[in-house]
């Protein structure tokens, strides 16, 4: 009976009395969690294995609800395990996993992780099968198990996707969310389920159900008549129609469903989005897009009438009211802030939650926000981010999945596999020759067909192993190219940083808005928000800002310059006190009603400021005081915000090139 090969882990244990230190890595997907196979369940197996091996258990790393196709740096605890393994001295000697699938179903998730641990001198032990990667036999078993898991995953995916594609081409219901206005007929009957209009066509004559298609038809009629989506929602609610979740209709929800492309065009497109997986040539991997025709809810004339009613004259752009962060500021109530409209003299953002979704619905009380401070701070952060080459380079390394501590040598792996492939090819060729010779010696009268079959049977396992080695090599080459792509990414980031220094400092508001949208910017206010005014902005502060003047400090010498020509009619209060009170108000940004009583009645101060400005005295007096000591307009500290951006250098640089071409003459 052949002796079982002893792995390095077992040999190390026999050679020393020191117990090896082991950690276990546990991973369960969301599906496994639902079935009851949680971390506790899988952890019992690894703990028992560690005890049986007489190792000392030092830590557990666990990722719950994470797919096996994710790479190491995309799983929080596996990423932490790798960071710990790179420490000196090493905190553990063995990583124990319940089975190969815990490492990863895809080869790109499996091998780089195992290789780096090998290079660090850390073993990997598999509980299921009781083997490790310290012998040629163990590595072969590990490779075959990983390939088998990936093949199984691809087979299941192809069968599932192929079935859905075939069903879509036959016009059947393909699953997923049912478009509003339709329902699934013959649901649960294999090959028969399909989408039909949800109306009273199949009901008894006395049907009282408020069907979805009935609301769409009634809503279309209301809008053509009234040209007001809010009124459409009010009438629909009054008629007893409700959304699919039972809630009342609102302006946006009614408009969205009545003008749905699926309803207007009476068709559903399967695999028509830009997110469909495609091969290197751009062709869909699992099948072409399929248009599933549906029964129309509206007639063609009704569709044309609705489209015409919904047409609006193009809105003229206004450079004075460009809200660069509209829809990108997160509100405390969970909604988003948008531009406050043209009715205010000061740019403000208002929360979408302040608008009722339907008549009588709850609204939030989120404060109005002053636009300029938030926009300026967000733009400052964006400029600093795009102009910081060191930070951008670090982000590139994070995205590519390249860690500076990683020591995977792809070249060595490829060279090792090349040797194995050469040897395996020789084994295949020698086996073919020997098998042919053996068959000929056994029976000279054997038929060619039988001889060929015999050779194929003998060589098949060897050929399968050769195919696996070649596949492994192909995978590693692709991973190496992906890693090398980080260099190109860094080059793009350098170009992006140069563009930032050149263009961002004087970029107009409309271009800022375009860039912030391209970056998918999201702003969260951390500290006190710069709240906007409910009423009119301070005209007094606006006057000093427009004149680019500081606020004069009213001294005895300064008062003598304006006292001679002061416009004054009251005997109840001295004019100098009134002027001092007005200057105090603008210097401290105090509301009129909150000015201290020592300056007199706030109404009197406001009346004289208005009268003096109209008569021209105010401008003359401030001109006379222009040489006096002054203080600047109060500038509140910049708001404390968090900024999240999605930076794709290639996309941004292409956008910049298009901008340059459009700006070029002729």
Image: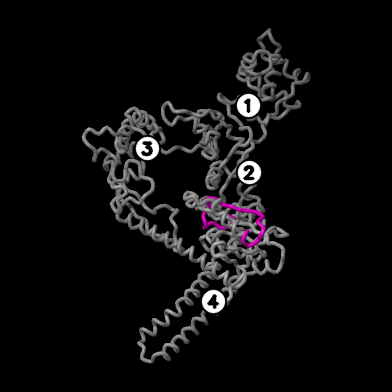
Q: Is residue 603 visible?
A: yes
Q: Which residue is mark 2?
A: 381
Mark sitting earlier along the chain (1/4): 4
In front: label 3 or label 1: 3
SS of the residue at dot 3?
loop
Residue with the mark numbered 1: 543
Residue 240 quadrant: top left
Badge 3 is on which residue? 244
Between residues 173 and 233, which one lies in front from this camera angle?
Answer: 173
Q: Measured from the top left, where is residue 392 in percent x and y?
A: 63, 53
| Residue matched to label 4 | 421
Which residue range is magenta in the image?
51-73
Q: Nearer the viewer, mark 1 or mark 4?
A: 4
- What residue is shown at x 67% (from left), y 12% (from top)? 568
Instruction: Identify the mark nearer the N-term, 2 or 3.
Output: 3
- Tell me the CA gap for discs 3 and 4: 60 Å
Element marked by disc 2: helix
């Amino acid at each position: 009976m052949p002796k079982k090969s002893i792995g390095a882990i077992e040999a190390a244990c026999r050679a020393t009395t020191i117990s090896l230190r082991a950690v276990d890595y546990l991973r369960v997907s969301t599906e496994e969690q639902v079935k009851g196979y949680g971390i506790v369940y899988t952890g019992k197996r690894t703990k028992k294995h560690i005890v049986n091996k007489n190792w000392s258990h030092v830590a557990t790393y666990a990722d719950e609800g994470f797919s096996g196709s994710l790479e190491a740096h995309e799983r929080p605890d596996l990423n932490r395990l790798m960071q710990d393994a790179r420490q000196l001295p090493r905190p553990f000697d063995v990583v124990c996993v319940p089975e190969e699938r815990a490492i990863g179903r895809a080869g790109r998730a499996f091998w780089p992780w195992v290789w780096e641990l090998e290079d660090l001198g850390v073993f990997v032990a598999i509980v299921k099968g009781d083997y490790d990667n310290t012998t040629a036999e163990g590595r072969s078993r590990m490779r075959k198990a990983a390939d088998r898991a990936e093949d199984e995953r691809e087979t299941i995916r192809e069968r599932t996707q192929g079935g859905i594609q075939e069903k879509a081409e036959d016009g059947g219901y393909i699953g997923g969310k049912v478009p509003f206005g339709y329902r699934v007929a013959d649901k649960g009957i294999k090959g028969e389920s399909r989408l039909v209009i949800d109306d009273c066509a199949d009901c008894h004559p006395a049907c009282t159900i408020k069907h979805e298609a009935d609301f769409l038809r009634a809503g279309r009629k209301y809008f053509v008549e009234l040209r007001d989506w809010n009124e459409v929602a009010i009438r629909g609610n009054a008629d007893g129609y409700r959304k699919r979740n039972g809630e009342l209709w609102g302006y946006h929800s009614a408009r969205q469903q009545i003008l749905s492309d699926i309803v207007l065009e009476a068709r559903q497109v399967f695999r028509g989005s830009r997110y469909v997986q495609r091969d290197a040539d751009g062709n869909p991997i699992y099948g072409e897009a399929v248009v599933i025709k549906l029964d129309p809810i509206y007639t063609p004339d009704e569709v044309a009438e609705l489209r015409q009613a919904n047409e609006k004259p193009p809105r003229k752009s206004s450079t004075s009211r460009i809200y660069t962060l509209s829809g990108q500021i997160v509100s405390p109530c969970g909604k988003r802030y948008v531009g406050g409209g043209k009715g205010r003299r000061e740019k403000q953002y208002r929360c979408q939650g302040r608008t009722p979704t339907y008549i009588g619905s709850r609204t939030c009380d989120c404060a109005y926000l002053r636009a300029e401070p938030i926009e300026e701070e967000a733009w400052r952060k964006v400029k600093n981010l795009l102009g910081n080459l060191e930070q951008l380079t670090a982000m590139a390394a994070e995205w590519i999945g390249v860690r500076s501590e990683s020591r995977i040598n792809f070249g060595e792996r490829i060279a090792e596999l090349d040797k194995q492939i050469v040897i395996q090819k020789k084994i295949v060729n020698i086996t073919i020759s020997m098998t042919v010779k053996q068959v000929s010696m056994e029976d000279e009268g054997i038929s060619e067909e039988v001889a060929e079959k015999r050779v194929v049977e003998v060589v098949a396992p060897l050929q399968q192993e050769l195919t696996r080695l070649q596949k492994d090599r192909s995978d590693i080459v692709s991973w190496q190219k992906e890693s090398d792509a980080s260099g190109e990414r860094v080059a793009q980031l350098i170009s992006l940083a140069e563009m930032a220094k050149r263009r961002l400092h004087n970029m107009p508001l409309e271009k800022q808005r375009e860039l912030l949208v391209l970056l998918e910017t999201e702003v969260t206010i951390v500290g006190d928000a710069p709240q906007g005014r409910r009423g009119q902005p301070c005209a007094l502060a606006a006057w000093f800002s427009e004149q680019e003047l500081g606020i004069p400090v009213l001294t005895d010498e300064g008062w003598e310059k304006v006292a001679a020509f002061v416009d004054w009619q009251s005997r109840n209060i001295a004019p100098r006190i009134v002027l001092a009170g007005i200057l105090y108000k603008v210097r401290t940004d105090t509301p009129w009603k909150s000015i201290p009583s020592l300056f007199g009645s706030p109404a009197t101060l406001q009346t004289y400021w208005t009268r003096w400005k109209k008569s021209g005295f105010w401008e003359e007096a401030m001109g006379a005081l222009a040489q006096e000591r002054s203080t600047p307009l109060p500038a509140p500290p910049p708001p404390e915000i968090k900024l999240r951006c999605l930076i794709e250098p290639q996309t941004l640089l292409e956008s910049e090139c298009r901008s340059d071409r459009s700006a070029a003459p002729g």
